[in-house]
Image (cartoon, rainbow, N blue to C red):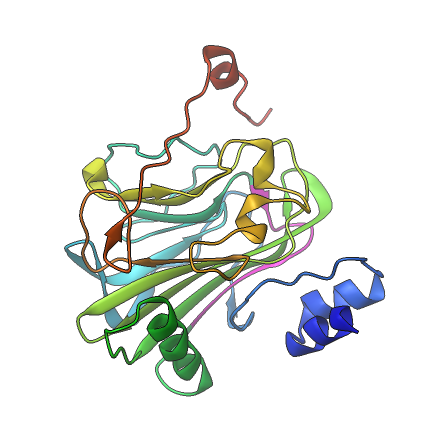
Amino acid sequence: MNVLYLCFQNINHIGLFCLFHGLPNCFLGPLYPTSGTASSAIDDGSSPKITLLRPFFYFGRTYNSIYVNHNGHLTFDAPWYSYVPQLIPMHGLRDIIAPFWTDLDNRGNGQIYYNQYTSGSVLQQATRDINQYFPGLNFNANWVFVATWFEVAYYPTSGTRTTVQAVLISGGQYSFVLMNYGIIASTTLRIQAGYDTIGSTHYYVLPGSFTSAASGSNSNFRLSSNVNEPGRWAFRTDHGSTGCTFNDLQASFLPVLLSDSAKRNLHHKR
């Protein structure tokens, strides 16, 4: 009964997939609505430039547009087609939010959706979530942007299904990012999850990145959390000291080091 309850509480294609395929552990993750404009079915593609209905503050910079890149990341100034994840901190020239940076391919199955909300139940949900995770701010969301990589396959294996989300939330002077994880298919591809800023003045790496714990039913992304809600990671992004701040406490860095042989074996398309 617990399995059915979880599925019906999150009634969408993931829930139906879970029920119809008889999965023994129906864990859908704490997803926001999986709907909106569908990006084109292009390998290593990106959405067009999306004009934001509210400005988004990201560690000292204000952005009015965004790109949903097909390989599991968001960028602000231009699309980015990189399918081989790089180690964060990159110390580069790009602000990036990467809930699931790997080689994804939406040509065979899956959709990449994006949607904006300025009223309604999604704003109410965001307000509740942020006040729970960051108490004392008296926060009221006035804008939510949801990007969902919904049941998307890994390149080039059509049929694998992975669902992840990036949720951007703003209200007044505050801004936040949620990373939500649903069903994550197993893969041997390298996966990076986290965020980075220009020059890496602020960055965070989700534990499990670049390890076997990134994918599959035991993915650390979907089973762990920094807000005590498995499958969800929450970050305040309007300001912060070097690294990630949560509830005004600085989190430790989580850099991942690769051996020379591991670096040589990073995935490249043939």
Magenta-tinted stretch: 104-115
**Residue 116's image quarter?**
bottom left
- Left or right of residue 215: residue 89: left
Q: In the displayed image of the protein, which residue is found farthest to the left?
A: 60
- Left or right of residue 238: residue 229: right
- Left or right of residue 49: residue 222: right
Question: What residue is shown at x 74% (from left), y 71% (from top)?
Answer: 2
Image location (x, y in percent) of residue 3? 76, 68
- Left or right of residue 242: residue 34: right
Question: Does 34 appear in magenta?
Answer: no
Image location (x, y in percent) of residue 227? 43, 60
| Residue 30 or residue 109, whichever sits in front | 30
Image location (x, y in percent) of residue 211? 55, 31
40 above or below 243? below
Question: What residue is shown at x 43% (from left), y 54% (from top)?
Answer: 226
Q: Quadrant of the C terminus?
A: top right
**Residue 20's image quarter?**
bottom right
Question: What residue is shown at x 37% (from left), y 67% (from top)?
Answer: 133
Q: In the displayed image of the protein, which residue is found farthest to the top?
A: 261
Question: What residue is shown at x 52% (from left), y 23% (from top)?
Answer: 266
| Residue 110 or residue 238, whichever sits in front | 238
161 above or below 157? below
Question: Does 109 appear in magenta?
Answer: yes
Q: Quadrant of the N terminus?
A: bottom right
58 above or below 140? above
Number of marks in picture = 0
Image location (x, y in percent) of residue 128? 40, 78
